[in-house]
Image (cartoon, rainbow, N blue to C red):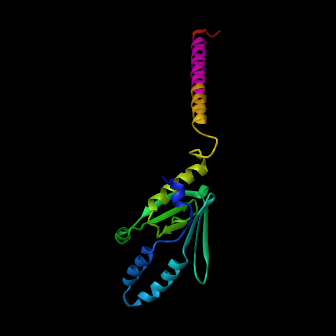
Amino acid sequence: MVDLGERVRGRRRPHQNLLTYYALESLLVGPFFPLLLLPRYLRYRTLRYQFDDEGVTMRWGALFRREVSLTYGRIQDIHLTSNLLQRWLGLARVQVQTASGTAAAEMTIEGLQNYDDVRDFLYSRMRTARGLVPAQDSPLGEESSDDLVAALREAAAEIRDLRKLLADKAGADAEEPDE
């Protein structure tokens, strides 16, 4: 059985259904569809995704190359969107947001049919990068979580003892008459 990371990692190209989606969407503008289809065709032919241990990178462009790289630690939220036509073609958009000043997605991953796997992979890497979940390969595992639980229980017991001492001291101070 191949794990989630193995299914997503590596260099990826968009599925051919993305070109079909671009063509159908371009037809909606009527006689001007070649003006919209040409740049989308070039985007489809040059679009590449790279998922590695550091982050995700997206590259595209024929005349003017663009590249967007995000480390997993910068990712704030991930949204999955698809319209009726995209669902029919088995596609969706994975919108990756960071803490930038804009409300728009920093990166939109489109053209992949395993979009659920991509979203789950990005969420797991984001949580691991933030330290919310220990990495599977890291020395932190169940032993360290057991140690953490034990330390928290010990701290809670100490806090209960301190509260009891403070309550006893407050009771003793109330019984002493003021002179």
Question: Where residue 69 sits in the image (x, y, percent)?
Answer: 61, 66
Question: Where residue 48 sits in the image (x, y, percent)?
Answer: 56, 72
On screen, 134 above or below 166?
below
Q: Which residues are magenta?
A: 155-174
Q: Quadrant of residue 10?
A: bottom right
Residue 122 visible in image = no
- Judged by its main secondary structure, the magenta piece is helix
**Foreground pick, 167 / 130:** 130
The residue under the point 51% across, 57% down is 77
**Foreground pick, 177 / 28:** 28
The residue under the point 48% across, 81% down is 40
The residue under the point 48% across, 52% down is 1
Is 157 magenta? The answer is yes
- Residue at the extreme bottom: 31
Q: Is residue 53 left or right of residue 119?
A: right
Question: Where residue 92 sits in the image (x, y, percent)?
Answer: 42, 66
Q: Quadrant of residue 25?
A: bottom left
